[in-house]
Structure formats: C-alpha cells, structure tokens
C-alpha cells in the first residue's frame, strides 16, 4: 500500500531546495527530551513564542510507505533550532514511516492506526502541541523554562523516534522538523489535507460495508487517487 509515495517524493523535493547550510541531520547521541506523561498547559506569560501562532502555520503529518526511505533513520532539521528562534513563526513536523512489506492490506491499515496513536500520546516538557484530529494544524507553544534548559529539536525528535521504534514492523522512521522561512508551508498544508482525505477513505474501506460509489462521500478522492478503488473492491473479494 504505497498511496503516499508521491507526496513523500514531493516533500523531499521541496526540502532539497533549502540550502545545505541550513539543513542538519541531528544524529549525534541524543537523550530523548522528558515526556511529562499528560497534556500540560503553557500559559501566555510562560510562553517564549508559538510555532504556528499569530498568522503563521504550525503543521504536522505522518506519511507511510513500504518502500525504502531516502534517508536513514533519524531526526532532521531544516532551518533554525528552538533556542535560535525568538518570535512566532511557521513550523512543520513531518514523519515518514517505512513499514515492512506485506500483502495483508488489512494488517497494514491497522499498523497505520497504531502509528497515528503515537501523535496523541507524547507530551514533551515545555513543548505544548495543540493537536487537532480534524486538521493538519499543530501550533506548538514553547516555554521560557524549556529554552533555559536548552530544549532542541534533536531531543524532541528522539522522543518521537523512540516511540515509533517500539512498534513492530516499523523498519525506518525519519522525523523532520522545518522552520525555514522559504519553505512553502501552504503547499505542505494542502498535501497533508490530501493525505487526510486518503486516510478517511482507508477508514471507510476497512470499516464500512457501504460499497456503492455512487452514494459514497469519498467518491472524488477515489476518482483521483490511483489504487483506492481497487483496494476497496479487493477487500470485498477478500471478505467474500
Ligand atoms: S471505492 Fe467507492 S465505496 Fe469505496 S471508498 Fe471509494 S468511492 Fe467509496
């Protein structure tokens, strides 16, 4: 099930336009940033700045493939790190996950859901992500205290990476942070929106008995995304 491969290629193409001097592979030994275990508030007076605050965009999305990823497992940064930022600005957290090849589409779908669960269950200290399940937007408040403790994308990324690594059949994960001013955040938001539509179609395909395309609200997506309709009717044959 490689429905997101075109998007992964497209995003990598956009990232490669950023000058290599402003790209970093944050692979060096890292300790995961502390997870406080539950949602915590960072109030306005405790906040240093917001990624995605005041007319800027904060985005997050996870895309899956069973093909080898271009980069080896790790955390990558395009732009400035958290302690170098001083004001609200746009930001993106992009995760690419490579899963083991499988002919069991149903098992792959369940794996997507398991991986998606990670997003809602990480609470880094001083890094308050406001996640919306119906939108790709993820504004993040950074606390003054966390900056004093030298919070970094490397340590935050390591925290995410360690959670993804615990999931069976995950072969490779790239956690990519983008803060570069020249990155096209609007284009990424559109792409994540598209990925969300595909995910909704997958939810329908694997959980609903309605197979009448003429009455299905996802028809437009299935008309445009190669492989979705075949997947649904393949599932029908499989169930029969
Ligand atoms: S294949 Fe048809 S029924 Fe299935 S999700 Fe797509 S439009 Fe809906």
Image (tube, grey):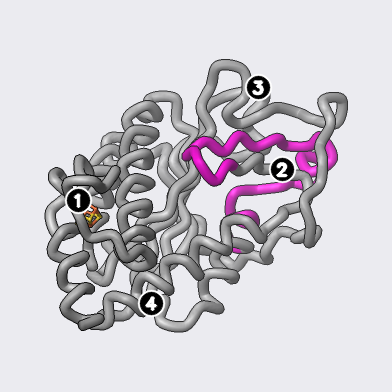
> Which residue bears the numbered disc 4?
171
**Mark sitting earlier along the chain (2/4):** 2
> Which residue bears the numbered disc 2?
128
Q: What span is colored magenta in the figure?
A: 132-158
Q: Is residue 223 left or right of residue 44?
A: left
Q: Quadrant of residue 14?
A: top left
Residue at horizontal 54 percent and vertical 66 percent from the top: 161
Instruction: Count neighbours of disc 3 (C-alpha within 10 A) and say few if under 14, some if 14 to 19, many if 20 or more.
Output: few
Disc 1 to disc 4, C-alpha distance: 20 Å
**Mark sitting earlier along the chain (2/3):** 3
Q: Is residue 122 left or right of residue 35?
A: left
**Mark sitting earlier along the chain (1/4):** 1
**Mark sitting earlier along the chain (3/4):** 3
**Mark sitting earlier along the chain (1/2):** 1
Disc 1 to disc 3, C-alpha distance: 33 Å
Question: What element does badge 4 sit on?
Answer: strand
User: Taking 216 as reference, is 115 above or below it?
Assistant: below
Judged by depth in the image, the label closer to the viewer, 1 or 4, is 1
Q: Is residue 150 magenta?
A: yes
**Quadrant location, the C terminus:** bottom left
> Which residue bears the numbered disc 3?
87
């Amino acid at each position: 099930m490689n429905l997101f491969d075109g998007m992964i290629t497209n995003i990598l193409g956009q990232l490669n336009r950023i000058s290599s001097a402003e790209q970093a592979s944050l692979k060096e030994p890292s300790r995961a940033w502390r997870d406080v275990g539950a949602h915590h508030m960072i109030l306005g007076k405790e906040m240093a700045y917001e990624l995605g605050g005041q007319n800027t965009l904060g985005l997050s999305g996870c895309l899956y493939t069973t093909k080898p990823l271009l980069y080896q497992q790790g955390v990558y940064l395009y732009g400035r790190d958290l302690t170098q930022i001083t004001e609200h600005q746009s930001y993106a957290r992009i995760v690419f996950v490579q899963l083991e090849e499988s002919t069991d589409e149903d098992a792959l779908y369940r794996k997507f859901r398991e991986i998606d669960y990670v997003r809602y269950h990480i609470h880094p200290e001083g890094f308050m992500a406001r996640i919306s399940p119906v939108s790709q937007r993820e504004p993040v408040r950074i606390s003054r205290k966390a900056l004093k403790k030298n919070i970094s994308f490397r340590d935050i990324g390591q925290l995410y990476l360690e959670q993804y690594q615990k999931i069976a059949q995950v072969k490779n994960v790239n956690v990519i942070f983008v803060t570069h001013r020249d990155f096209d955040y609007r284009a990424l938001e559109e792409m994540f929106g598209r990925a969300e539509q595909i995910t909704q179609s997958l939810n329908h395909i694997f959980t609903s008995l309605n197979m009448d395309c003429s009455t299905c609200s996802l028809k437009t997506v299935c008309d445009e995304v190669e492989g979705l309709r075949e997947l649904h009717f393949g599932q029908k044959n499989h169930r029969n």
